[in-house]
Amino acid sequence: MWDRNSLVSVTQLSRSDIEEILSVASSFVREPRELCKGKILANIFFEPSTRTEKSFQSAMYRLGGQVLTHKDAGSSREKGETKEDTIRILAGYADIAVIRDDEEGQIMRYAALAGVPAINAGDGSNEHPTQSLLDAFTIMQEHGRLENLRIAFLGDLKYGRTVHSLMKVLSLFPGNEMYSITPSSLTLPAEMRFIEAGHYDVENMEKALNEIKPDVVYCTRVQKERLKGEKGSYIMHREILEALPTTCRVLHPLPRSNEINADMDSDPRVIPFKQARNGVPVRMAVISMMLKAKKELE
Amino acid sequence: MWDRNSLVSVTQLSRSDIEEILSVASSFVREPRELCKGKILANIFFEPSTRTEKSFQSAMYRLGGQVLTHKDAGSSREKGETKEDTIRILAGYADIAVIRDDEEGQIMRYAALAGVPAINAGDGSNEHPTQSLLDAFTIMQEHGRLENLRIAFLGDLKYGRTVHSLMKVLSLFPGNEMYSITPSSLTLPAEMRFIEAGHYDVENMEKALNEIKPDVVYCTRVQKERLKGEKGSYIMHREILEALPTTCRVLHPLPRSNEINADMDSDPRVIPFKQARNGVPVRMAVISMMLKAKKELE
Amino acid sequence: MWDRNSLVSVTQLSRSDIEEILSVASSFVREPRELCKGKILANIFFEPSTRTEKSFQSAMYRLGGQVLTHKDAGSSREKGETKEDTIRILAGYADIAVIRDDEEGQIMRYAALAGVPAINAGDGSNEHPTQSLLDAFTIMQEHGRLENLRIAFLGDLKYGRTVHSLMKVLSLFPGNEMYSITPSSLTLPAEMRFIEAGHYDVENMEKALNEIKPDVVYCTRVQKERLKGEKGSYIMHREILEALPTTCRVLHPLPRSNEINADMDSDPRVIPFKQARNGVPVRMAVISMMLKAKKELE
């Protein structure tokens, strides 16, 4: 069971941990409660990420707490301070730490140094557990369940490792069928293929979606520099959108390039902004659960 | 009547709307009240403006609320996100949005996108309604009335369009006489001349002020690049100041160049810092009225 | 006695003022109290300093208050606004001001302009009174007394003028013996020598510490550019550390270079992070005392 002292990877969470987090998040949507009054969250960003940073900040405010934000382009690093020292100092002024790193795989070590509960807010292209949780929460809110769903993942599934986390979360629930629709150079890595119910090339996106009849389409951004000349970007044209089942929901973690044009935002199936807003109750749940756990252990 | 869902321009406000805002602001000077506890204001600045940003932040704090600040020189825009997406995301984490833009005329559209009440904190050289309201509030506090006043506007009245807003506000009240004292290349535009009781060239500032005997002198900054070689800047020398009526008040929206030297700040007629502080109760009034209106409509 | 309207230098404080501040700080360690609810602190930094800025912010949050942060690399200075105007504006939105300057000796004048109580958070290499107070508080917490102590100061005692403040604080208490261990080019300036019980060259650090048997070792950072080619940096090797008395405490104001390696952080004698955390209750004490004093005087 999750020890609640750190949230570095979704693999720390069992199915019932995830169900509890989503249930607490759901209670905050119905009624926010100031459970963290007098507490301080340190938002430590070694890489910029407006959405994630502001979403954690809003979550802590909704819980009645306060936020110290440190974006590292500044004074201390220039003086040659290590990330480790920065984290220890800032976490020492706070009750819980949120850490975003520009490198992979160091966060577990940082979390141990912090001396307070610590949340991974993205370590390079590695894990970003609260993003996967808010994605799962959004699916739950829209479909009323996290099982027996047909989900199509669209775009870069090679480097988009945060998507892998969502896939792992969904694989904990029975009956989910996950499909990938990608450029040929950006398919799922070998070790993740077991999760795949089927694969299509992005050139055949329309046909693929017609066949899959997905409950959820999860779009990701394809970064040009990863395509090496290949034509692999995709655009969800109005015709493609309208062919989707009316109960289908199209998710996108944002920021978007032109995968989903703004003129489709009014379609009730396209919900990236609703999804973004869901980050607040989900992070409220994680923060309040981790602060409570800490107190009980003391 | 003002719908309280947006404040983009002073032209949305009737005389009685303005009177209500100033009256609420006045009540906050006597006694601040935490009317916005648990609420979050998103301060979204696509152009820097320290005074305006901090004044809105202080106002929200005085109301017991919280503030998310986004200054856009950062992560998201670099990734190519549109302003529209940024606004939708950030406003989605908040209950009310304050937007400062570096372009003219887009704010009404942005306000509609925000999904929460939205306030224009300046769109380029166009509107900046809370500045005009705090100017009016300052005159009200100092003179006890907003009518039957003689006001001299000094400096750039061509590009200083926020001054036009103050003129429009004052023209809603009877008996006000507005004079302009400007370089010849920076006079009021043709469509605003109807408001002018008289015009003087800035070269004759001293004589002009002697003739006008103003209740209020409103100074604006003349930016060199707008003068095209003409000698048009002005300095309120001590002799000029001392010739003004003792009840006259000299206002300046700040930041100032050398229009009013710091050695005149001790003169009780010179009140730009008092004026700046008045931004807090006025913005408290606007924010609390817009958040209350929203609630009633829900 | 300290008038509590400004804290610019430790020389404003008597022994009993210091004892009162440390006693109030100590009470906040036992139980934080929201004594500054509804109050706003303006954190005005004309020079970056992450630790100091965040420590003041955390302190004000723990007191239930709010914080406006202005880091000056931005809008206003570019428009040519003076520091004086910036301070008057921002302090006008707040109840207490914290000012960090990149120049020496202007803070007393700035404090007078602010119109609210003002705290010096470092003016260049001159004073930084709350740093000295938190150093003294740390010694008090660790040894239970501020008198009859043997303290070894290590590193740059020429330019490290904040260390001079700590020395002055300790000299107010009886029986303290202060030793300096420095490179030959970075010894105490002549006017401070009266405070010195003895001096050693940093080349003989190990021998010096063996002879002094210090209760406290206060390390400072030696900046290479100040050594002019001389070999003067020092590293507290494990052997040196282990030869210190077990009750000795090693302090460092951070950020550190390699004076104390991270692999010694687990030694209970090495406490720079504990020391940093002590900045919060000490600043809570100073802020709450200054805000209370202000209220009583009104």
Image: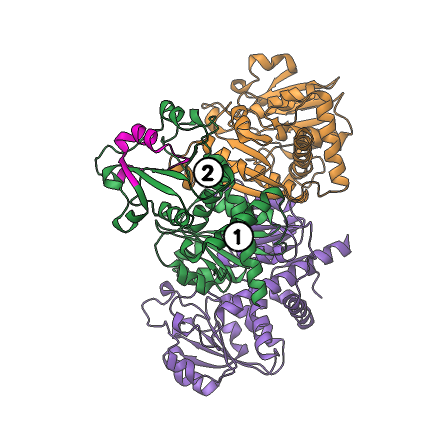
Chain colours: A purple, B green, C orange
Q: Tell me the chain of label 2.
A: C
Disc 2 on helix, strand or loop?
Answer: loop
Report the residue at 76% width, 29% height from top.
C143
Q: Position of residue A80 (x, y in %)?
A: 50, 39
* Closer-to-camera residue (A28/A132): A28
Is residue B249 positioned above or below C147 on the image?
below
**Residue count near mark 2 (Cα–Cα under 10 Å), binned few <14, some 14–19, many ≥20:** some
Q: Position of residue A120 (x, y in %)?
A: 58, 58
The reply to whether discs 2 and 1 touch (Cβ–Cβ < 8 Å) is no
Q: Is disc 2 in the same subunit as disc 1?
A: no
Residue C250: quadrant of the picture:
top right
Residue type of the residue flagged with mark 1: Glu
In the picture, which quadrant includes the N terminus of chain C? top right
Report the residue at 60% width, 49% height from top.
B63
Disc 1 on helix, strand or loop?
Answer: helix
Badge 2 is on which residue? C72
* Closer-to-camera residue (C249/A32): A32
Q: How many marks?
A: 2
Q: Which residues are magenta?
A: B198-225
Q: Position of residue A121 (x, y in %)?
A: 56, 58
C-alpha gap between disc 2 and disc 1: 36 Å
Q: Tell me the chain of label 1.
A: B
Badge 1 is on which residue? B20
